[in-house]
Image (cartoon, rainbow, N blue to C red):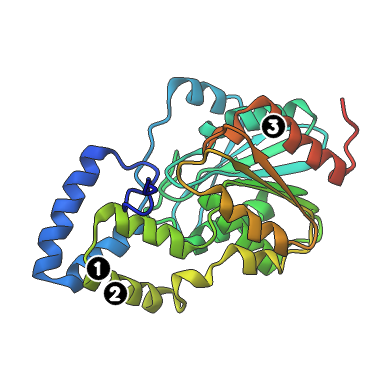
Amino acid sequence: MNSPEALGERSIPGLSARTKARLRLLFRLLGALSPSLAARLALRLFITPVARPIGSEEAAFLATARMRSLSSTHGRIQTYEWPASGPTVLLVHGWVSHTGRLRHAISALHARGFRVVAFDSPGHGHSGGRYADLHAVCDIISAVSRELGPVNALVAHSYGALASAVWLAEQTPAELRAAVLVGMPRDIGYILESFTMAMALRPKVIERLRAFFYARYGAWPEFYEAGALAAQIRIPVLLVHGEEDEFVPVAHAVPVHQRLEFGELSIRADLKHSAPLSNAESLAAIAGFLERHLSVAQR
């Protein structure tokens, strides 16, 4: 039997069946008229998140934090802090998400005595801005680390995990001693390919889209590859991946683990893409890893 990927049926976060059908029709018409125009629109959509509503439980949880707004070149950024006497852990959410969706992970870490800080990426949650490419997320990680740090550990999910890997490979601060990367895709090329498959883009549109990507960022999408980034990270890293991940195949984690100097791999049976950050056993493993490497006495 053919896999969903072989059939061109990859899922991407935040895209409903109705919206996908409408966008496919738009790109079919626009691609026939002007492949370049279709490619320009595709690149804009690729880096523009769809706002995910903040539910009532999520809003109530966020209200328990100390909130602070930071100015940035990517728009106003909303930050959150849950004070405690222990080491500081920075949480980074994924694409089409927000800090409220990390409430289970934040609560679990805070209960262990960690001080937890987080932020909404540009175009997500309560933050301003419109675009959220890797460079924007890396810039915000740096800004939050400066303003709310020092940060001793980082826990990041999905697209946020790949952005965090870029940041760690380029500029790991001396005080940052451990990281947990959850559901991380292998590279931006895979994410872009998933997008082109979901939009059913014509080959000529894809060719121009990749060219526009290179013109904007000075590199091909595959340049931002998790394995190559992992080889440059010198702190202990725990990779966590749900065995039933519907967005990023679990196989993506294996070569990354092989290239980490100090790496551990945790495959969580029966869990989907976001579940490791809400599952009690998975969260206990994440907290335990951080406690070991940050020398926190277990409660």
Gap in Å between the C-alphas at discs 1 and 3? 40 Å
- 221 to 282, vertically: above or below: below
Residue at coordinates 36% horizontally, 41% vertically from top-left? Answer: 14
The picture places residue 39, in percent across and down from the top left corner, at 24, 68
Q: Left or right? Give the position of 173 relative to 80.
A: right
Q: Secondary structure at mark 1?
A: helix
What amino acid does circle 2 point to? Answer: Glu
The picture places residue 221, in percent across and down from the top left corner, at 45, 69
Q: Which mark is residue 283?
A: 3
What amino acid does circle 3 point to? Answer: Leu
Residue ID for mark 1: 39
Residue at coordinates 81% horizontally, 61% vertically from top-left? Answer: 174
Q: Residues within 10 Å of mark 1 (few under 14, many from 20)?
A: many
Can residue 115 be seen in this snapshot? Answer: yes
Q: Secondary structure at mark 2?
A: helix
What amino acid does circle 1 point to? Answer: Ala
Q: Nearer the viewer, mark 2 or mark 3?
A: 2
Instruction: Tell me if label 1 and label 2 are in contact, CB under 8 Å.
Output: yes
Quadrant location, the C terminus? top right
Residue ID for mark 2: 207
